[in-house]
Image: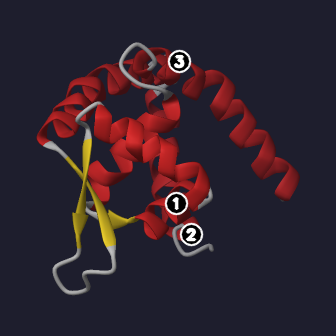
Amino acid sequence: MAGDFLAVLAFMRDKFFATLEQITRPQMSHVQYRAVSLLYRKGSLSMSELAKEMHISKQQLTPLVYKLINNGLVIRKTDEDDRRIVLIEITETGRRKVEEMLPEIKLVLMEKLETLPVAELDELMQMLKRIHEIIKNVE
């Protein structure tokens, strides 16, 4: 199963994500887009939470966050309940960037998928929902 899972991930990377990186690259790196889109979806996260979500170390995250701050895409905030915790939050500029790129990203995915017969698209949609339910609980 692990081999099949890796094969699917590699295929997805090659067929879908490489194209998506071409969309985001003119505005920000793929890693920057991952961070900003995570904050767009999840709201404020501490540095530790963001590093965990991105599967990188806090040491790797720090320069990335500084670059995003310098580009006006995120801000650092102190947690109101615990002033020791620094939160990273998407700015309105960051939110607009994600919202500008999402339609193009979705269009590219739709164009790639529209070659499939309707029955297979329906089956794929059901499978994706089920896969999401199963793997969202995996740590």
User: Residue 31: percent from the left, percent from the top?
Assistant: 51, 37
Q: Residues within 10 Å of mark 3 (few under 14, many from 20)?
A: some
Query: Is label 1 or label 2 in front?
Result: 1
Q: Secondary structure at mark 1?
A: helix
The local secondary structure at tag 2 comes to helix
Residue occupying the point 56% across, 60% down: 58
Q: Earlier in the sequence, mark 1 or mark 3?
A: 3
Q: CA distance from mark 1 to mark 2?
A: 23 Å
The image shows residue 133 at horizontal and vertical percentages of: 49, 68
Circle nearer the N terminus (3, 2)? 3
Could you tell which of marks 1 and 2 lies nearer the N-terminus? 1
**Residue 18 quadrant:** top right
Q: CA distance from mark 3 to mark 2?
A: 27 Å
**Residue carrying label 3:** 19
Label 1: few (<14), some (14–19) or many (≥20) C-alpha neighbours in 10 Å: some
Q: Report the front residue among 64 and 49.
A: 64
Find residue 134 and name its label: 2
With 88 as the anchor, is 67 left or right in this view? right
> What kind of residue is marked 3?
Thr
Q: What residue is disc 1 on? A: 51
| Residue 1 appears left or right of 33 | right
Label 2 packing within 10 angstroms: few (<14), some (14-19), many (20+): few
